[in-house]
Amino acid sequence: MADQMNAKVKLVDGMTFDATPDSGHTVRVDAAPDVGGRELGPRPLELLLMGLGACTGMDVISILRKMRQDVTAYEVNVHADRAAEHPKVFTRIVVEHVVRGRNLSEEAVRKAVGLSEHKYCSASAMLGKAAPLEHRIRIVQENAAGGVEGLRQ
């Protein structure tokens, strides 16, 4: 039997909803002000981008730790272009992995990102079916004192 996930999305007021998944962690979601939102939470499509970034980020950092890479900082920046007309779907998504650390192996970072992109990240697999999805890598090498030695893209 396939796994199942559930979420309850409950109207709070106006265009504000509380979304609660099986884990019980509630996220407040709101619409843009031009359609009645009050900036009380992220918009639904922003949550999709956040989910993609977190999904691939968790994969990559886990894999890099198993590879014993000395990562001192890591962030995932997700950029998406949207269609001009409704439904304003994503037409292109770029995921940028910025990995900072000491003596990082470019090969290890590329392998970790590739495994996430092609094998482990469910959000990447799903959104990649809806829009072209590209992963980019930026590696920032630190010296022992924490200064930057080199930047590779």
Image (cartoon, rainbow, N blue to C red):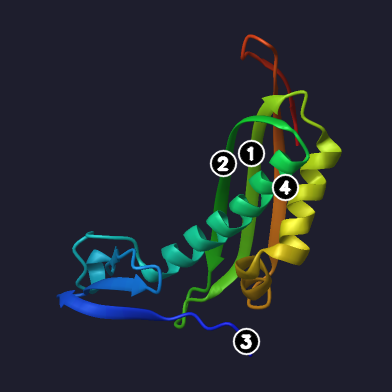
- Residue located beneath label 2 in the image: 75
Q: Residues within 10 Å of mark 4 (few under 14, many from 20)?
A: some
Task: Work out whether 36 lies above or below 147.
Answer: below
- Tell me if 34 is positioned left or right of 58 in this view: left
**Residue picked out by circle 3:** 2
Type of the residue with mark 2: Glu
Mark 4, secondary structure of its residue: helix
- Distance Cα–Cα, label 1 vs label 3: 34 Å
Q: Secondary structure at mark 2?
A: strand
| Residue 7 position in % (x across, y down) | 38, 79
Q: Which residue is mark 1?
A: 98
Question: Please, what secondary structure does the residue beneath circle 3 have?
Answer: loop
The tag on residue 63 is 4
Q: Quadrant of the C terminus?
A: top right
> Residue visible at 64% across and 48% down?
96
Choose top left, top right, bottom left or bottom right for residue 137: top right
Q: Residue at x 63, y 90 (%)?
A: 1
How far apart marks 1 and 2 lie (CA) works out to 5 Å
- Distance from disc 3 to disc 2, alpha carbons, whole Å, reads 32 Å
Mark 2 to mark 4: distance in Å? 15 Å
Density class for disc 2 (Cα within 10 Å; few <14, some 14-19, many ≥20) is: some
**Distance Cα–Cα, label 4 vs label 3:** 25 Å
Residue type for callout 3: Ala
Is mark 1 in CB contact (under 8 Å) with mark 2? yes
